[in-house]
Amino acid sequence: MSDGVASGVEPPLRVMVVDDHPMWRDAVERDLVAAGFDVVAVAADGHQAIARFPAARPQVVVLDLQIPGPGGVEVTADVLGRDPSARVLILSASGEQRDVLEAVKAGATGYLVKSASREELVDAVRRVARGDTVFTPGLAGLVLGEFRRMAEGPAPQPDNELTPRETEILKMVATGMSYRQIADRLVLSHRTVQNHVQNTLRKLQMHNRVELTRYVLERGLGDEDDE
């Protein structure tokens, strides 16, 4: 792996795997290493994860929710408090809406159930590292719907600074769609979609897609107007 840097190729993504089941943890580690990632640390519980995170400096943490010690939600909040540039991908046996919501609120960028294939896991790690939001199919809509139901009091006011197109793209970003998928759906160029997202980031004084997604979820904007 080290000779990749010498040849001018980007170094492999640094990943940490946290799971209390040894066979599952080893299998995930093998799959990620085989895909070219650098697994810089593994942990069997929340205490180990928090203790090993600073020295390992992973870019992505693949994390089970149901682990001993501090649970996955607490670990997510802790590691992102230490390094906001890190990304957390939950890999859990639970597809319960409550678990997904708590993970997203804590700052997780993605959520896969353990029935996901090796290819889906590898793709999710790559996308999460880029700042994309990734959900097991079906969970994104459930999360958005739940946040809408949780929104009490006055209905969320539209953001006057955003154009209708920017708002439309913002909702798609929150569901985990890539720029290319959004461009294909709206019959726009990839560059045009990128420009809309950058304009939205600037107007909302945010820095990345993760913050945009949390903005949509917290305000219950959802996708009820989408076809």
Image (cartoon, rainbow, N blue to C red):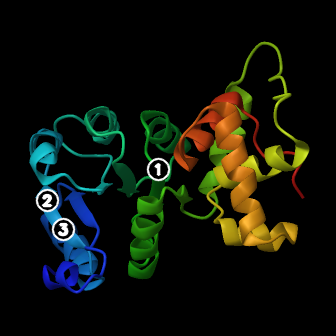
- The disc at residue 42 is 2
- Residue holding disc 1: 109
Q: Is residue 29 left or right of residue 86?
A: left
The residue sitting at 30% across, 53% down in the picture is 63
Nearest the eye: 179 or 118: 179
Query: What is the x, y in percent for residue 92?
Result: 37, 56
Q: Are marks 2 and 3 in contact (CB under 8 Å)?
A: yes
Q: CA distance from mark 2 to mark 3?
A: 8 Å
The residue sitting at 53% across, 58% down in the picture is 132
Query: What is the x, y in percent for residue 2?
Result: 13, 79
The residue sitting at 69% across, 60% down in the picture is 194
Which residue is farthest top? Answer: 153
Q: CA distance from mark 3 to mark 1?
A: 19 Å
Q: For the C terminus, give its image quadrant.
A: bottom right
Helix, strand or loop at disc 3? strand
Which quarter of the picture shows residue 114? Answer: bottom left
Q: Is residue 216 above or below residue 151?
A: below
Helix, strand or loop at disc 2? strand
Mark 2 against mark 3, which lies toward the viewer? 3
The residue sitting at 75% across, 52% down in the picture is 196
One can see residue 95 in this view = yes
- Residue holding disc 3: 39
Helix, strand or loop at disc 1? loop
Q: Earlier in the sequence, mark 1 or mark 2?
A: 2
Count neighbours of disc 2 (C-alpha within 10 A) and say few if under 14, some if 14 to 19, many if 20 or more.
Answer: many
One can see residue 141 in this view = no
Q: Is residue 134 above or below residue 170?
A: below
Query: What is the x, y in percent for residue 98?
Result: 51, 38
Callout 2 amino acid: Val
Nearest the eye: 89 or 72: 89
Callout 1 amino acid: Thr
Q: Are marks 1 and 2 in contact (CB under 8 Å)?
A: no
